[in-house]
């Protein structure tokens, strides 16, 4: 699938070394919004070479089912994933409760749901794999 030529509708900013993405004041995300977020993540991670991303969830009351899976796919590749200010409806979702841990000031960090010492990092990309993905003309594709 080709990457969008424009990330219009997506605001990118920086917060403490993390690239923060926001879809405006939308309360309900649909498949098109998820596609924009995916393309934004591809851009930030592969083109800007960021290893930490965050999504502003302060207005969001509903997310598509693939949202958390998309985040976990990047997390499995060694990307730090954070959410900012998710509303209660989102924090009550089973996937959220199992895989996010509260940090400070409304930030939540994605984790594996198992103790760190038991985590297997075999799926994380090597520096060579990062470079190979950055040099590709097409967006991210799983190679394993």
Image: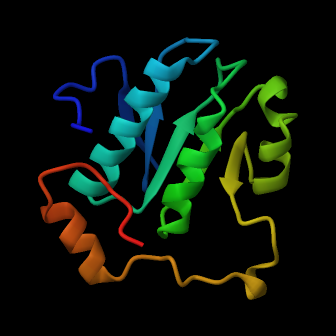
Here the colouring is rainbow
Q: Closer to the camera, 90 or 3?
A: 3
Quadrant (top left, top right, bottom left, bottom right) of the N terminus: top left
Q: Name the side, left or right, on which 13 lies relative to 74.
A: left
Q: Answer above or below: position of 127 versus 98.
A: below
Q: Answer above or below: position of 115 versus 89.
A: below
Q: Closer to the camera, 66 or 26?
A: 66
Q: Closer to the camera, 109 or 112?
A: 112
Which residue is found at the position 33% from the left and 54% from the top? 45
Residue 143, picture quadrant: bottom left
Which residue is found at the position 56% from the left and 49% from the top? 71
Residue 56, picture quadrant: top right
- Residue 65 place in picture, x, y as percent: 66, 32
Residue 89, picture quadrant: top right
Q: Name the side, left or right, on which 101 lies relative to 82.
A: right
Q: Answer above or below: position of 116 versus 71.
A: below
- Residue 95 place in picture, x, y as percent: 79, 45
Which residue is found at the position 43% from the left and 56% from the top? 17
- Residue 140 place in picture, x, y as percent: 31, 54
Q: Closer to the camera, 123 or 98?
A: 123
Which residue is found at the position 72% from the left and 31% from the top? 86
Res 38 seen here? yes
């Amino acid at each position: 699938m080709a990457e969008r030529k424009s990330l219009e509708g997506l605001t990118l900013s920086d917060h403490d070394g993390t690239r923060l993405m926001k879809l405006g004041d939308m309360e309900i995300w649909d498949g098109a919004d998820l596609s924009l977020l995916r393309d934004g993540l591809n851009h930030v991670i592969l083109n800007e070479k960021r290893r930490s991303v965050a999504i502003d969830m302060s207005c969001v009351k509903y997310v598509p089912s693939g949202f958390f899976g998309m985040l976990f796919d990047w997390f499995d590749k060694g990307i730090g994933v954070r959410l900012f200010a998710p509303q209660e409806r989102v924090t009550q979702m089973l996937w959220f409760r199992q895989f996010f841990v509260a940090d400070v000031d409304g930030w939540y960090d994605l984790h594996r749901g198992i103790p760190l010492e038991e985590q297997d990092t075999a799926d994380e990309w090597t520096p060579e794999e990062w470079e190979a993905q950055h040099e590709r003309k097409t967006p991210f594709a799983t190679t394993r």
